[in-house]
Image (tube, rainbow, N blue to C red):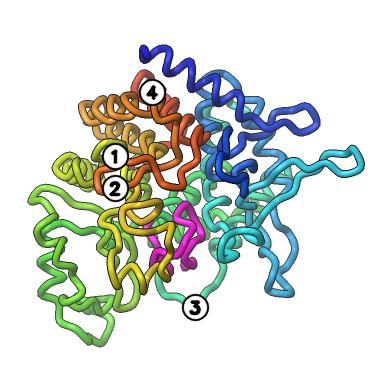
């Protein structure tokens, strides 16, 4: 099939995925053809729709994005978490669907009550802020964010994220399963993906909040947290060969304020694969960091979003792209790209995932390849002017996506197998391809989700 026809086919499929509420388009289902069983693939997920929204904005279809933002804001949790079994104020739902009762339509939201392991989605509200900013930049619809309901909604999210906590780090403490990696994968505490989304959401909120006396304290809190969060992530999450040598020579059990081994990381925790795998000129942001714990795995969403949002410095961004180029077969393989590397195997898989059969090695969230990540790779390549990598990634995707019927994910060390439980015609796979094509043909489009270097 010609590339033009592939884009046309993707647009047609995206239109088929639209959900209507009272006759108005308000979102897209997770998959057009759920296949094995419906589960919750007939719902609209907030994080999934961000890609659909960007694709609609690029096609001059802002109405559905505006409707989505309004309706999801109406679903935002406002009630105090009195009984400990309901979401706290500010949280956005993981997903919603249109239900019919007594011939009247209503929206049924899921805040994690029906999710596997009953974990609420921390990332939904962060993605919502990022999308709100993208919509305003694309349309100039400033009147929407100046509405009192939107200003209040933004502040509720920030109050939830900036709440006083039992921590001395500027990062956000979250449980396993609270974002795209929605199953147990040992990413509790301060996973990179949430920290980067947190950073982007804080920067977005600075542009979205009206500069008035009512918002002054909130904006002040955002500025203070942004400064410390940026420093913390750049200083302590970064790994390259020089940093690895520092960690290897750390002294343990240091006491006091001025210590080199601030998090008490022991050299023996450095995995054997890393010393050979890390290239001379490459680097990346670690997957997690906490007391006596550094997750050395490479997580794609966090690293590529760090480039796109300018959390990573220009030099760090170049190093991340160097790493991807030099370890292309490991991180990209036959389908852009792997959600994390390496996979957990053997006893490590048993202990960390709880013997999760869906997250066996090199499958699903344990080292599987996800076509939706194509847009992030292309966006990061565009931002760093590494266009040869962007074209190479798009060509890989175009060779397989249509033939394989737009699957959710791929299995295997190189991503050659269609995921064992992958749904076909996955909406964010389709939308991710369209967004990637738009970014490569219109570089200005990337500015919807980009920030300037601070």
Label 4, on which residue? Answer: 437
Sequence-wise, the earlier of marks 4 and 2 is 2
> Badge 1 is on which residue?
416
| Horizontal relation, residue 37 to residue 104: left or right | left
Q: Which residue is mark 2?
A: 412
User: Circle 3 sits on which residue?
Assistant: 166
Q: Residue furthest front?
A: 36
The residue range painted magenta reads 170-192
Q: Residues within 10 Å of mark 4 (few under 14, many from 20)?
A: many
Of the image marks 1 and 3, the number of the one nearer the N terminus = 3
Which of the two discs, 4 and 2, sits closer to the camera? 2
Q: Nearer the viewer, residue 371 or 386?
A: 371
Q: Position of residue 432 (x, y in %)?
A: 44, 32
Specify the quadrant of the image occupied by residue 84.
bottom right
Select label 3 or label 2 by which is in front. 2
Q: Are marks 4 and 3 in contact (CB under 8 Å)?
A: no
Along the line of sight, the residue nearer the viewer: 375 or 305: 375
Could you tell me how far apart the alpha carbons at marks 4 and 2 are, in whole angstroms? 26 Å
Sequence-wise, which precedes: disc 4 or disc 3? 3
């Amino acid at each position: 099939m010609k590339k033009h026809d592939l884009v046309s086919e993707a647009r047609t499929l995206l239109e088929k995925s639209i959900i209507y509420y009272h006759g108005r388009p308000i979102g897209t289902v997770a998959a057009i053809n759920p296949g094995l069983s419906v589960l919750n693939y007939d719902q609209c997920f907030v994080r999934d729709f961000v890609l659909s929204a960007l694709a609609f904005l690029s096609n001059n279809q802002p109405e559905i994005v505006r409707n989505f933002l309004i309706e999801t804001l109406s679903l935002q949790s406002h009630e105090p978490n009195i009984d400990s079994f309901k979401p706290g104020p500010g949280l956005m739902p993981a997903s919603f669907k249109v239900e019919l009762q007594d011939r009247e339509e209503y929206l049924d939201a899921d805040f994690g009550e029906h999710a596997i392991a009953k974990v609420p989605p921390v990332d939904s509200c962060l993605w919502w802020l990022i999308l709100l900013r993208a919509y305003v930049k694309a349309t100039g619809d400033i009147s929407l964010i100046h509405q009192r309901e939107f200003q209040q909604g933004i502040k509720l999210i920030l109050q939830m994220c900036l709440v006083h906590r039992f921590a001395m780090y500027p990062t956000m403490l979250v449980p396993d399963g609270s974002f795209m990696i929605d199953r147990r994968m040992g990413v509790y505490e301060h996973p990179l993906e949430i920290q980067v989304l947190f950073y982007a959401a804080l920067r977005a909120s600075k542009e979205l909040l009206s500069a008035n006396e009512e918002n002054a304290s909130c904006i002040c809190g955002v500025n203070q947290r942004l400064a410390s969060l940026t420093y913390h992530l750049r200083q302590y999450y970064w790994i390259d060969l020089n940093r690895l040598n520092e960690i290897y020579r750390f002294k343990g059990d240091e006491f006091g304020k001025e210590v080199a081994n601030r998090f008490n990381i022991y050299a023996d925790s450095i995995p054997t694969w890393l010393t050979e795998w890390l290239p001379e000129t490459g680097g990346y942001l670690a997957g997690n960091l906490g007391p006596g714990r550094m997750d050395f795995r490479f997580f794609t969403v966090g690293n590529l979003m760090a480039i796109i949002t300018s959390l990573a410095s220009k030099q760090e961004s170049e190093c991340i792209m160097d790493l991807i180029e030099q370890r292309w077969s490991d991180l990209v393989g036959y389908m852009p790209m792997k959600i994390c590397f390496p996979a957990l195997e053997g006893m490590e898989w048993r202990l960390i995932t709880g013997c999760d059969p869906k997250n066996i090695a090199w499958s699903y969230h344990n080292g599987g390849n996800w076509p939706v990540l194509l847009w992030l790779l292309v966006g990061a390549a565009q931002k760093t002017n590494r266009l040869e990598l962007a074209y190479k990634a798009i060509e890989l995707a175009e060779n397989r996506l249509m033939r394989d019927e737009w699957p959710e994910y791929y299995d295997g060390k190189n991503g050659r197998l269609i995921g064992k439980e992958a749904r076909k015609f996955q909406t964010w796979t389709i939308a991710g391809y369209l967004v990637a094509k738009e970014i490569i043909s219109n570089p200005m489009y990337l500015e919807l989700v980009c920030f300037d270097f601070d």
